[in-house]
Amino acid sequence: MKKVKTGIIIPAIIFIILVLCSPLIFLYKSPQDESVQKWNSRITVTDGKVDRDKISKKFTVNKTGEITLFFSFLPVGVEKDDVSNVDINKIGCLTTVVVENEKGEIEYTSTAGSVFLDTTMYLEAGNYTVTYYYHSDAEAFREFANEYLCSQRATEEIIKETGFENFEKNATTDFIYELKVYSDKADRTHTGVILLWALCIGISFGALIAGIFKYSDAPDGKYRYDERQRTEQGRGYRAAFIATAISLIIPLMLGSTGIIGSEFMLFFIILALFIGVSVLIVYWIWHECYFAINENSTRLMIFIGIFGVLNLVISVINFIGGYLIVNGVPTIRCLNLFVALLSLEIFIAILARRAANAKLEAQEGEDEE
Amino acid sequence: MKNLKLKAARAAMDLSQQDLADKVGVSRQTINAIEKGDYNPTINLCRTICRTLGRTLDDIFWEEEE
């Protein structure tokens, strides 16, 4: 009895504590990944020519992910709220921004002459260079656009809208530059922490279920199988092993020849495991070695039914949300669908076995009479 | 090959398959499989069945030559 209590109560307490403490993990935030650079610079335009072509600054992305880049180059005395009042004509030049990675590949190019812009993009960890280019006439901008922008028509439209011909030929402007690099998700709980927590809850729930099944029927803590059942179980393992091996070898062979893309391999590995487990359980149920001697299968049927429906609901939600298949590739979320199908399969196998047994017993009864 | 001797011995003692299974300590399906000839029991199980039914191994498990 003491063993029973330990086997069920301890996992139950751990499971409840973990579930109740779940909100606490959202208090644990990842450190803010943010860098800010500020500097002042004077831009002088003399006879329609800027005193410099460009200036460059370097920044570092510490962690791969979605990064927001915020650029601001406001003339001194202009507040962020008054951006609309900045007259580019008076400044005498247009500024564009180009971000390049360590290999010199372009990650971002601004196309218009805004003095206040931000963009969010996926950047890998590493060093980057941001270069501010200055254009005082259409020809200078056209040269820049030929190198960094792809559409000639768009370039001509920007030139037309900007109106370079109206730019002051002589102007001096002091700018306050600000370059801010930050992760949009920096203030969120790290995905790894959530997954680890979910894993702990899953393990404790599994231990609780195992405890309930192990001790609830047999107070001495033992499920017993007779010799025929053990023999059949061995045959079941063999059948499941062969089924799994075949299910794995076929996609691996097709994958090596290029017929199946590597992105589908995860799906086929899960499918192979699903087939293997299906063969094992159905074989055991059909040969009546899944349940121990005198074990009641109704409880398992109820549990499997609830478990299957829950997973089916999750699968439907994932399907509607478009998470089940992304870009034509089945994702890890297919696991819920497989579990739902497996539950349904077990349910049907038990029902079929019961029906077959009832028929056999009726036949036996007739024979004995 | 069906084991009709086992079935007869069981019926003689007015035992159902489940009753015999409980006494022997196996599942009802195992007794059913032995009677139908789908499973060949080990000598240990044969002895247990014979002891329960008060018969010898020859009585229940020896096949008569035709």
Image (cartoon, rainbow, N blue to C red):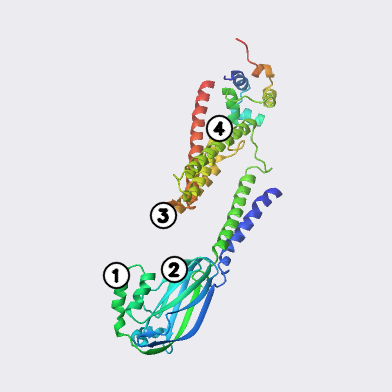
Q: Which residue is mark 2?
A: A106
Tell me if I can see residue A125 in this picture.
yes
Q: Is residue A351 left or right of residue B42?
A: left
**3 or 2: tag closer to the N-terminus:** 2
Q: Which residue is mark 3?
A: A327
Q: State the separation of the CA atoms marked 2 and 4.
A: 64 Å
Q: Nearer the viewer, mark 1 or mark 4?
A: 1
**1 or 4: tag closer to the N-terminus:** 1
Q: Is residue A299 left or right of residue B51?
A: left
User: Measured along the vertical axis of the image, is residue B38 above or below residue A189?
Assistant: above
Q: Residue furthest top?
A: B66
Q: Residue at x 68, y 16 (%)?
A: B58
Q: Mark on residue A153?
A: 1
Q: Mark on residue A287?
A: 4
Q: State the separation of the CA atoms marked 1 and 4.
A: 74 Å
Q: Nearer the viewer, mark 2 or mark 4?
A: 2
Q: Chain of mark 1?
A: A
**1 or 2: tag closer to the N-terminus:** 2
Q: Nearer the viewer, mark 3 or mark 2?
A: 2
Secondary structure at numbered mark 3: loop
Q: Chain of mark 4?
A: A
Q: Is residue A154 left or right of residue A124?
A: left
**2 or 4: tag closer to the N-terminus:** 2
Residue A88 horizontal/vertical position (percent):
35, 84
Q: Residue at x 59, y 23 (%)?
A: B35
| Snapshot quadrant of residue B46 | top right
Judge the density around disc 1: few (<14), some (14-19), many (≥20) Cα neighbours within 10 Å. Answer: few
Q: Chain of mark 3?
A: A
Q: Amino acid at mark 3?
A: Asn
Q: Nearer the viewer, mark 3 or mark 1?
A: 1
Q: State the separation of the CA atoms marked 3 and 1.
A: 32 Å
